[in-house]
Amino acid sequence: MRIDLHTHSDRSDGTESPAELVKRAHAERVDVLGLTDHDTTESWQEAADVAERVGVTLVRGIEVSCTYAGSGVHLLAYLPDPTYPPLAEELDRVLAGRNSRLPATLERLRDLGIDIDVHDVRRVAGETAAMGRPHVADALVALGVVADRNEAFDRFLGPQGPAYVHRYAADLETMIRTVGDAGGVTVLAHPWARRHDHSALDHDGVARLRDAGLAGLEVDHEDHRPEVRERLRELARELDLVVTGSSDYHGLGKIGHELACNTTAPEELDRLLRLAADAAARTSRDTPEVLVPR
Ligand code: AMP
Ligand code: ZN
Ligand code: FE
Ligand code: FE
């Protein structure tokens, strides 16, 4: 079984359509695909239609932009009812923050002497519902300012970069509860990834999040070195959290994150799906099914 629980389509900052992503998963013999675009469920319908047709088990999710103790944290939310009003309203707030950041980012770039406007970004952003820095990076590539997304983040868009602008993100503990109330389950994405401040995600911090309903930790991720993975796995064991592994695939948008380069063990997926079924039953929300091919 090849289980990859964290991937992106072009409805956020991946480079392939949901249909292309599902077909690629099928071609690469991925049995279970988690589709987790940033802050949006726009990709769900198209992916579900194709998954049923080609025969990939699809777990619909969202990677929600959150904040915890002053730092950005990504939360994987699987199988929540996306129409649950507190969830839908908070995702709208996060998406509004993305849209209002864009003009400010472009202003900074123009101050640096780069001739770029919103049309340059819209042109490369395609069907995205979650406008982000990667799209600005793609526009900079198209304008010949940088060679690739990486260079754009290193020189301009990263947290220390001259064109970095803060945006709104959801409170992490509240979002964990909200996803649970929406009948879904949550996993912390790449909790100890390089280039993130994760000092608040220590044993006690993660224990608090578990008490708020957190189900798991994404341990096997390219941004975790082997020692980091071992320490995180130990933490998950101590706190009785589900352990996941995934690629964080972005098509051509993220180098070194090939589909299924990390995977989740079948028994860990079973645990996660049981917790999701419990949440769905407890809340009576109309949650998405895990689409299993016939
Ligand atoms: P944003 O969502 O606008 O805050 O941008 C953050 C996203 O940019 C992350 O979720 C990553 O997918 C992506 N990202 C961050 N650093 C890089 C990088 N060096 N190269 C390509 N993509 C990146
Ligand atoms: Zn991304
Ligand atoms: Fe992430
Ligand atoms: Fe991601």
Image (tube, rainbow, N blue to C red):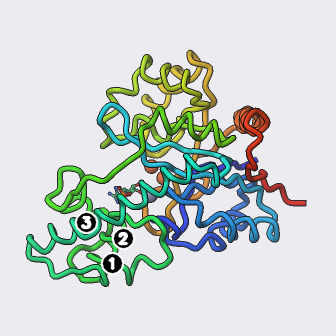
CB at mark 3 closer than 8 A to ligand 1? Answer: yes
- Mark 1 lies on residue: 121
* Location of residue 53 (image quadrant): bottom right
> In the structure shown, which secondary structural element does the residue marked by tag 2 occupy?
helix
Q: Is residue 207 left or right of residue 49?
A: left
Residue at 35% across / 42% down in the picture? 72
- Mark 3 lies on residue: 152
Which badge, 2 or 3, is on the more N-terminal residue?
Answer: 2
Q: Please state the horizontal and vertical placement of residue 263, each as a whole percent of the image.
A: 63, 45
CB at mark 2 closer than 8 A to ligand 1? Answer: yes
Q: Is residue 3 left or right of residue 248?
A: right
- Could you tell me how far apart the alpha carbons at marks 2 and 3 are, in whole angstroms? 10 Å
Instruction: Check contact, mark 1 vs mark 2: CB within 8 A.
Output: yes
Closer to viewer: mark 1 or mark 3? 1
Kindly identify which numbered label has been placed on residue 135: 2
- Could you tell me how far apart the alpha carbons at marks 1 and 3 are, in whole angstroms? 13 Å
In this rendering, the answer to whether 293 lies above or below 212 is below
> In the structure shown, which secondary structural element does the residue marked by tag 3 occupy?
helix
